[in-house]
Amino acid sequence: MPPGPPQPSLSRRLLLQLMGANALAPAVRTLGRGLLSIFTMHRFTDPQYELDGTDPATLRDHLAYLRRHRYRLLSLTDALKLLEDGDAGSRTPAVAFTVDDGYADFATIAAPIFAEYDCPVTLFVTTGFLDGLLWLWWDRVAHVFTQTQQTSVLLPVGHEVVSYRWSTPSDRVHAQQDVIERLQMVGVAEREAVITSLTHQLNVELPARPPSAFAPMSWDDVRRTARLGATFGPHTVTHPILGLTNDVTCNWEIQESYRRVRQETDACVPVFCYPNGKPHAWKQNVLQAAERAGIKAALTTVPGYVDLHRVPAQETFGRFALPRFPYPSDRGHLAHVVAGMARLRTAVRRGTYPRPPAVLPVSHPRTEPVAD
């Protein structure tokens, strides 16, 4: 199992606590002028399920902080307009929120909180999931590991045959996470073969529809949360890594998911979200497929800022590979990102203070474990 992200040192933890202090917010906010920080989330914690996700109390605290200190909370529609027209006159950092996949907890937990703080949010929908045609593959893996009574499995993944054994719940979780991590890097056919082998070896029968812990929201939920202010974008039909598909499949996944979202709600935005949005997921042909579908921009999971003072609208690659930060688990990390400190830290490390490019990737630790 690969090691997790390194834990911050004591001095860094103290700095992050200081960053989250209300008294410091007006001073640090000026560092992020002209920058847009887009955050991505997936799940929201619910007491009845033992799942990793964004804590509702933390989300409320963060939104209250951003409102209190007058950060601009943008919809993706607003962000698109600024990408097209520029934002040279503003000195206030901007923030946008996105959620991927389409789980039911967005409708029951997250959307009412965003509405409470009058904060725009866009959910990227895996349309086959909402249509009841599938349940997401990493949830099937998690379900099998959770339900099995077995304590070992031997799986051929890629060019390796990997052996897993576990004797404690923690060991089992590590095995599950490693399988999910490996399956992110293989094509759909191979991934399905591995999951089939997993279910047989671990003697677990997968139900046709996902259990409530992994259930999608409904299209009625989409329309109801749209009335609360949420907007929606396409996230493919079946959630493949598009860079590993052929052109016909890639085009269909993008176009059909966009069609279904527009068919079900007027609150659709012309922005696409790449499944597993790392560089291998959005090769040149994938970017071109999104543009052909009538999409105006697309989001990755590469951490970084969008510089609204330098409009990337004329650069197709920039507009179709916009970065997003993983959602922070505490206020200090949030303040660090939205104030532009990640850019400043990079400049200090290099010994220079250059004007950032239109899309500026920066290193930032993943704080929310996700399969997407």
Image (tube, helix red, strand yellow):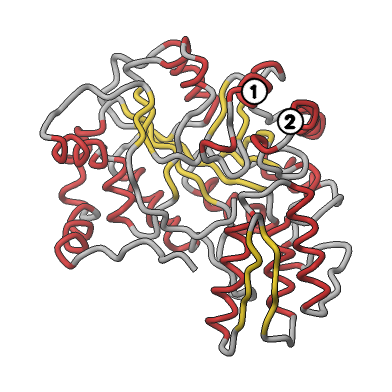
Amino acid type at mark 2: Cys
Seen from the viewer's position, the closer of residues 195 and 298 is 195
Q: Residue at x 54, y 74 (%)?
A: 174
| SS category of the residue bearing label 1 | helix
Tell me, yes or no, whether the two marked residues, 2 and 1, touch with CB atoms within 8 Å: yes
Vertical order, 363 against 18 (above or below): above
Seen from the viewer's position, the closer of residues 62 and 159 is 159
Per the model, the C-alpha gap separating discs 2 and 1 is: 9 Å
Q: Residue at x 64, y 75 (%)?
A: 48
Identify the image quadrant of residue 306: top left
Vertical order, 138 against 304 (above or below): below
| SS category of the residue bearing label 2 | helix
Give the residue number, with chain letter if any, for mark 1: 285
Q: Residue at x 73, y 55 (%)?
A: 191
Vertical order, 211 against 24 (above or below): below
Tag of residue 250: 2
Badge 1 density bin: few <14, some 14–19, many ≥20, Cα 10 Å: some
Query: Could you tell me residue 122's position as x and y percent?
Result: 58, 38
Instruction: Tell me: 331 left or right of 294.
Output: left
Query: Could you tell me residue 206's position as x and y percent?
Result: 84, 69
State the residue lying farthest toward the bottom.
167
Seen from the viewer's position, the closer of residues 23 and 306 is 306
Badge 2 density bin: few <14, some 14–19, many ≥20, Cα 10 Å: many
Tag of residue 369: none
Query: Could you tell me residue 160's position as x and y percent?
Result: 63, 61
Seen from the viewer's position, the closer of residues 215 and 246 is 246
Precedes in sequence: disc 2 or disc 1: 2
Instruction: Tell me: 321 left or right of 215.
Output: left
